[in-house]
Amino acid sequence: MKKLYIMLCVMALGVSVANAQEYEAPVELWDCEQVDGSNYHGYSFNERWEVDFRVENQDGRYTLTAEDIVLAEGLIQKYIAYLNREHENQGGMCPVIDEHMTKYRRQYVGFTDVDGFRIAWVNFLWDDNLTDEQLAQDVLLTTGGCGHFWHVKINLDTEKIYGLEVNGYGETSYLPRAKKRAPRISRPKHSGDPQRIRKTGIIHSDEEKLF
C-alpha cells in the first residue's frame, strides 16, 4: 500500500512538471534602444511601443534604424535654425533651441504614412532633473517649460523637416498616459494551472509620475 502511494505521488509530480514545461512565458514586447552620437544622446522606441499621438496621414509604425537616426539628426542640425526663425516661446529665460542643441536629450519614434514614407518624430527635453532611467521608461509628453521642451518631424525619404512644436510658457508638467490598460491575463494551456500575469502596456504608478 505504501509503495502504491509513493508511485501515485511520483506520477502526480511528473504530470505537474510536464505541465509546467509546456507553459511558455510570454515575451516582453516593449523595447527601446539607447542612441549616442557625437553631439546627441537619447533613446529610440520601436514600432511595438504604444504612443498616445499620431502623425499626419499615419498608416503605421516603423522601427528607426541607426542610419535613420543619423540622417534625422543631420537634417535637424542643418535646417533647425531656419525652421525656428520666428523663435516661438523662446528668448529671455527660455532658451533659443537652435543655440543649445547639445543640451537636449532625445526620444525617437518612427511612423509610416499613407504614401509609404518613413517619418521620424523626435522629442527634445532639457531637464537636468530627468534621469536616463526615466528617459528610457516611456515617451515623455510635457506642457510648459517653453524652449526647454520641443519636438519635430522628419520625412526620411524626402528629407523634409517640419512640424516644429515648442512648449508654451509656464511651469513644466509631465503628462500621464492617456491610455491605461490593465495587465492582460495570459492563461497556460491547461486550465488547471495557475494564471500568470503578462504586462502588455506601460502603466505609471503615482511615484513614476513625479519626475
Image (spheres, grey):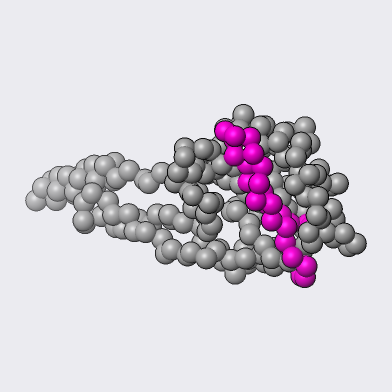
> Quick one: 108 or 190, which is closer to the camera?
108
User: Could you tell me how many numbered marks the image carries?
Assistant: 0
> Quick one: 113 or 125, which is closer to the camera?
113
Please indicate whether residue 7 sits to the left or right of residue 168 in the image: left
Classify 204 as above or below 77: below
**Quick check: can you spot residue 149?**
yes
Classify 160 as above or below 186: above
> Quick one: 6 or 55, which is closer to the camera?
55
Image quarter for residue 127? bottom right
Quadrant, the C terminus: bottom right
Please indicate whether residue 158 sits to the left or right of residue 198 in the image: right
Residue drawn at (37%, 59%), measured in percent from left and top? Answer: 184
Residue drawn at (28%, 54%), measured in percent from left and top? Answer: 187
Residue drawn at (80%, 54%), measured in percent from left and top? Answer: 86
> Quick one: 142 or 1, which is closer to the camera?
142
Image quarter for residue 110? top right
Residue drawn at (69%, 56%), measured in percent from left and top? Answer: 165
Magenta highlight range: 147-171
Classify 190 as above or below 71: below
Residue 159 among those drawn in magenta: yes
